[in-house]
Image (cartoon, rainbow, N blue to C red):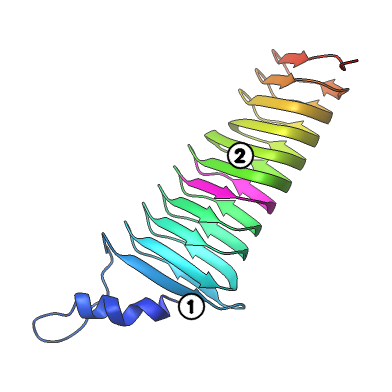
């Protein structure tokens, strides 16, 4: 497991005890830690209130610290367990947002799962599969191939091909949507243009599906 190899010596020097023994702090506020990723290893970011600068080729990256700031390259998978993190990433294979209050931006994500409440994910390009099972979280993306909403969240996208809403009190703002299935209640869906195939089996859903422009 890659565990802050490049930064470890610097941190140990800062936290040496009077007796000369070095102790790695559980809480390392104010540090900016460079981390060299290695493909095939899991890179763990464990400290609270730390800014991490990841480099190299990342396999699995796991953020367990709270209130971290992470800048990172492309990774096979990113798991955010800690709360209150702010992450700027390149393209991600998998993204699991478990910790609450996470804020993340990336150009593309293959598979996205959000369960941490109050999180914000912004993707400038494509999300192939997105599943939100949270409360008060939001996803903004250009295009979503498959979208599943199981909680009470907000999604905005230019295009969503297949959308299934089983949760309640979700808000969807889409420019175009091909297929929409609702079984949850009190969801609000707006599709600005185009033709959408809709199946609404829920209760008290509000649908604003505007006709195709000519």
Compared to residue 57, the image places residue 50 above or below, namely above
**Magenta stretch encompasses residue 110:** yes
Above-or-below relation of 171 to 73: above
User: Residue 205: x and y, percent?
Assistant: 70, 15
- Image x and y of residue 11, in percent: 27, 75
Main SS type for the magenta part? Answer: strand
Q: Earlier in the sequence, mark 1 or mark 2?
A: 1
Q: Is label 1 in a helix, a strand or a loop?
A: loop
Question: 181 left or right of 78?
Answer: right
Q: CA distance from mark 1 to mark 2?
A: 30 Å
Under tag 2, what secondary structure? Answer: loop
Residue 151 vs residue 136: left or right? right
Residue at point 77% right, 34% down? 159
Q: Residues within 10 Å of mark 1 (few under 14, many from 20)?
A: some
**Considering the image in quadrants, where does the C terminus appear?**
top right
Q: Which residue is mark 1?
A: 2
Q: Which residue is situated farthest in the front direction here?
A: 214
Q: Is residue 203 magenta?
A: no
Farthest left residue in view: 18
Identify the image quadrant of residue 91.
bottom right
What residue is at 26 percent from the left and 60 percent from the top? 30
Q: Position of residue 208 (x, y in %)?
A: 75, 14
Residue 150 at what x, y percent from top left? 66, 35
Depicted 43 relative to depicted 88: above or below: below
Q: Magenta segment range?
A: 102-117
Residue 133, numbered circle:
2
**Image point 85% across, 23% down: which residue?**
194
Residue 50 image-quadrant placement: bottom left
11 lies left or right of 4: left
């Amino acid at each position: 497991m890659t565990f802050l190899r490049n930064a470890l010596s610097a941190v140990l020097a800062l936290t040496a005890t009077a007796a000369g023994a070095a102790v790695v702090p559980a809480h390392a506020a104010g540090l900016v830690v460079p981390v060299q990723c290695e493909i095939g290893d899991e890179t763990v970011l464990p400290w609270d209130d730390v800014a991490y600068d990841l480099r190299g080729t990342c396999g699995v990256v796991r953020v367990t610290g709270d209130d971290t700031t992470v800048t990172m390259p492309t990774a096979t998978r990113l798991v955010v367990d800690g709360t209150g993190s702010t992450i700027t990433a390149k393209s991600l294979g998998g993204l699991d947002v478990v910790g609450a209050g996470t804020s993340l931006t990336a150009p593309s994500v293959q598979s996205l799962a959000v369960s941490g409440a109050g999180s914000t994910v912004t993707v400038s390009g494509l999300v192939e599969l997105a599943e939100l099972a949270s409360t008060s979280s939001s996803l903004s993306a250009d295009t979503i191939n498959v979208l599943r909403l199981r909680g009470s969240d907000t999604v905005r996208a230019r295009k969503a091909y297949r959308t299934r809403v089983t949760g309640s009190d979700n808000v969807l703002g889409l420019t175009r949507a091909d297929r929409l299935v609702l079984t949850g209640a009190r969801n609000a869906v707006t599709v600005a243009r185009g033709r959408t195939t809709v199946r609404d089996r829920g209760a008290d859903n509000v649908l604003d599906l505007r006709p195709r422009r000519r």
